[in-house]
Structure formats: C-alpha cells, structure tokens
Image (spheres, rainbow, N blue to C red):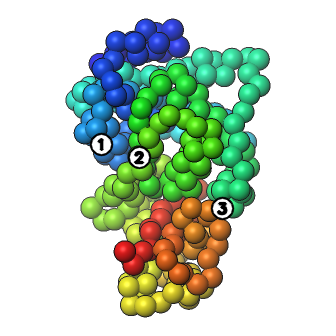
Amino acid sequence: MKLVRTLKELREARASLAEPVGLVPTMGYLHEGHLSLVQAAHRSCASVVVSIFVNPTQFGPQEDLARYPRDLQHDLDLLEKENVDIVWAPEDGEMYPPDYQTWVSVENVTRPLEGELRPGHFRGVTTVVSKLFNTVQPQKAFFGQKDAQQAQVILRMVADLNFPIDIQICPIIREADGLAMSSRNTYLSPAERQAAPILNRALLSARSLYENGERNAAVIKNSLQDIFKEEPLARPQYIAVVDPATFEEIGIIQDKALILLAVYFGKTRLIDNLILSGK
C-alpha cells in the first residue's frame, strides 16, 4: 500500500495500477461501514484507491470541521489489512490552492432537506468529488446509502457531466443494536449512545406500517414523531418521506419511497434512512 500526499505522487502511483480501478472517497476516521465499501471495490476492481480528506468546503460556519475526528495512522493500519493499493490523503492546500475559484453545483436534488439546512454543503461535496474523480480517474466509485441525498446528488452529477464512472451505492452497515455506523457516533455521550438506536427502531416501525398496507406519508411521519416523543434525548430535525430520485416530498406512496431522518442527540446530529418498496 502506498500513501500519497501530493497530486504529482498520485499521478505517478496511479499510472502503475491494474485496471479497472475502484475509488472509495472518505473523510477518514474509518469504521466497518467504510471498510465494507473497500471490500465491495475489491470484488469488482483490480485495484483500489481510498481517499482520505476532510473536505472544508462542505462544512458550514457553525459546523464541526475543527473537531471532526481524525486518526490517519489508524486509518492506514485498517486499509493496509484490506490490501488497498493507494491511499490519497492530500492537505487542504493541495485540493484548494489560494487562488481556487471553480465550483460544481447540482440544482434541484440539492435544494430540500440537507441542502436547505446546510447551505453550500452539496456544492462542496460535488466539487471535491469531481476533483477526486479527475485526479484518480477510476472506472468505479463506491458510496454508502447512509448519506442518501449525497448519493443521489453524485449520481445526478455523474450523469449530467458524462463522467465515465460507474457509481455503486452500497448498503448501510449497522451496529448490533441497529445504529448506522458513522464517524460522528464518537461524539455521543454514553446516555446518548444508548438512546441513538431509536432511529433504526423508528425506521423499522415505518417499514412495518408500509408492509401492512399504509401508503399515506403523513400517517407514517406522524407515527415516527410519536416514537421519538418517547425518547427525551432525541430531537428530530426532520422526518421526510420523499421520491428516491428527486427528493421531493410524497403525499401518497405509489411505487417506492425513501424515509429520511435527521435527529439531534445533544449537539450530535445523526442521519439515517430506509427505502420502502413493494418489490
């Protein structure tokens, strides 16, 4: 495994990789969810590149960039065991030099939910992912379903800008108690960590309603709100039932829908989601 920190080093190392190349973009502080993406990349690619970059342009002024967890050596130890070929871990200045002025924006699908609550977030995501695609030049790239709106934004960007890259969206990896794995879980106090699996329990309750014939999104959302009222440490920011492609709110579920949750536990904001489909 080779660690590269500059674009020059990356291009030199990339030239010797066997094709096809799979890219797993991350912000580091890796867990089993990230490693599942690496394993998926290995199953269909001859070479695997993992990027580790805490992208400053996707954090708002009041968000947690400074305290976002980082442990590069731990990440490298994990990736070494996964037989990753290249780890691309640039410094901020390598990705955004002082005169940087070019941005990539996706329109409609970025506007609701995360886009409304975190202005500029998706512009930062799409810009940095475009730069990772251009620097690594993978044939495939692997993202997690947990960041569902981000995944759809990237799919839209790749289609609209004709990136010759196959985007693979991989399942959410959960702890034994159902909590979706996330680097931000480390922020939770013991009591908050004990309360946090209520997100998954709420989603499973929604699935049960759906499987028993409920198609009214308002009924499903109200049921989830009642569940969260039972946990005093949980403060829902939004509960949404949307079209999985457009992220527009749904009134009556016709074919499939995506339930999205954003919930605060103390100062820690967690997201989760579940696809409802009769197929």
Q: CA distance from mark 1 to mark 2?
A: 9 Å
The residue positioned 40% from the left and 12% from the top of the image is 15
Q: CA distance from mark 1 to mark 3?
A: 29 Å
- Relative placement, left or right, of 138 versus 80 is right
The residue positioned 69% from the left and 61% from the top of the image is 112
Residue at mark 2 = 168
Image spot of residue 255 (x, y percent): 49, 77
Q: Which mark is residue 40?
A: 1
Q: Give the structural element (helix, strand or loop) at label 3.
A: loop
Q: Give the structural element (helix, strand or loop) at label 2.
A: strand
The residue positioned 58% from the left and 84% from the top of the image is 252
Give the mark nearer the N terminus: 2 vs 3.
3
The residue type indicated by label 2 comes to: Gln
- Relative placement, left or right, of 220 versus 251 is left
Image spot of residue 223 (x, y percent): 52, 86
Identify whether 87 is placed above or below 190: above
Residue at mark 3 = 113
**Quarter of image, res 278:** bottom left
The residue type indicated by label 3 comes to: Leu
Foreground tag (1 vs 3): 1
